[in-house]
Amino acid sequence: SSVQALPHERLIGWRISAPSGHAFDGSFPAPHHGIAIQRSVLDALLLNEAKTAGAEVRCGERVGDLLWSHGSVRGVRLGAGRAAEEINARLVVGADGLRSVVVRRLGHLRRAPRLKKLALTAHMSGPVDPRERGELHILANGCIGAAGVGDGLTNVTVVVNAESVGSAIAGARDAYFDALVARHDRFGGWQREDEVLATGPFDWPVHSAVSDGAMLVGDAAGYFDPFTGQGVYRALKGAALAAEHAHRALEQGSTSARALAGYDRAHRSAFNPGARLQRAIEAVVSREVLIEIASRGLGFAPSLADALVAVTADLRPVRSLLDPRLLGRLKSNGRH
Ligand SMILES: Cc1cc2nc3c(=O)[nH]c(=O)nc-3n(C[C@H](O)[C@H](O)[C@H](O)COP(=O)(O)OP(=O)(O)OC[C@H]3O[C@@H](n4cnc5c(N)ncnc54)[C@H](O)[C@@H]3O)c2cc1C
């Protein structure tokens, strides 16, 4: 309810269009709806909740390194050089995002990214805001996502293959973003309201979400691709799982990797099926022929489109896509 009290847009589902312009809709299962909200607004609320719960919040500090004792993490070092400050802790939780220092210092990075996507994002305003449905416009070499986030602003994100467009973007990301968005029929007459932020790649898998004296949460514990979003849910749900296991380990007096192993298992079982589906979706959307076939198929099979949207919104488990009742509904879609 505190999130709903903030400026946001309510989403009932997604409209997804293929490069040809052919589009289909997928809706969230009633009574659920999505919330599209500015990160600055959501993050301020989360920070405040943490403070209220007793956390000491220190903004503008950067963890530069981990502290070790007999092969186990025993804290973090803030900053570097003379200004460095050491903080001891029985357990360090690395929730420091895609380029996590904690992951790198633990040596938990499994490999360099294979999927090299780059996201450019900005707030825009336009003659017709997306209302009620987020929009995903798939292009031959990437996609444009758009969702109203309240206050008359729409978050517009362009995701492209970094390897094929990297040099075109270098030093000119605002111009690249503006040109790509302006070329799309949907965004004619739209205006960018702030600077373009760039991030990526996103494919940073880790060996494990735990180590002696440390846990990983959110993007630090592995993300893949922003196409289906899901990262905020994974971060919040992962944090809830981590809190449960951290509490138990601290109460039992051991934060060894063995004592924290239950978190790693719970994390895998909560998120690995979704990550596999993300890979399957990427295999389709990265091939123009397949996305055209899929968009036409899903246009004729609204039950399947809704089921996919429910799964990628984390409202239904991935296995629900194999539910025989869905097959039954698909047959009746085919008859109409
Ligand atoms: C373009 C784009 C669109 C997306 N769209 C969606 C969407 O629609 N829905 C969705 O659910 N997800 C979406 N995601 C993913 C989502 O943003 C992330 O998965 C989510 O923010 C992960 O949360 P996090 O807390 O793990 O990491 P972050 O939100 O990245 O937070 C990490 C924090 O750690 C801080 N930090 C980093 N390094 C250090 C350090 N060394 N010391 C101290 N602090 C540090 C950072 O400043 C930051 O505050 C999108 C991502 C991108 C890039």
Image (cartoon, rainbow, N blue to C red):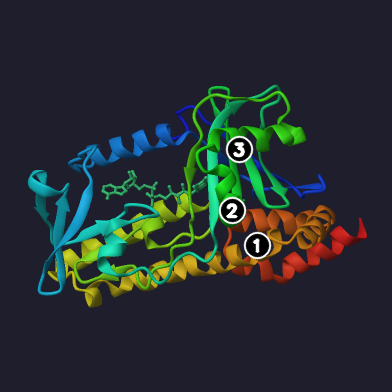
User: Which residue matches tag 2?
Assistant: 228
Number of marks in the image?
3
Circles 2 and 1: CB atoms closer than 8 Å: yes
Q: Position of residue 302 (x, y in %)?
A: 78, 53
User: Which residue matches tag 1?
Assistant: 281
Residue projecting furthest to the right: 335
Determine the CA span between mark 3 and mark 1: 26 Å
Q: Is residue 207 left or right of residue 79?
A: right
Instruction: Name the front one of labels 2 and 3.
Output: 3
Q: Is residue 34 left or right of residue 98?
A: right
**Badge 1 amino acid:** Ile
Q: Position of residue 64 (x, y in %)?
A: 21, 52
Instruction: Name the front one of labels 3 and 1.
Output: 3
User: Which residue matches tag 3?
Assistant: 176
Q: Circle 1 — which element? A: helix
Please tell me which residue is depicted at 22% across the width and 61% down the height of the picture.
247
**Badge 3 amino acid:** Tyr
Q: Is residue 243 left or right of residue 83?
A: right
Tell me if I can see residue 313 in this picture. Answer: no
Does the closest atom of ligand 1 sit within 8 Å of the Cβ of label 2? no
**Badge 2 amino acid:** Thr
Determine the CA span between mark 2 and mark 1: 9 Å
Q: Is residue 267 left or right of residue 82?
A: right
Camera-nearest residue between 262 and 164: 164
**Where is residue 187, by image quadrant?**
top right
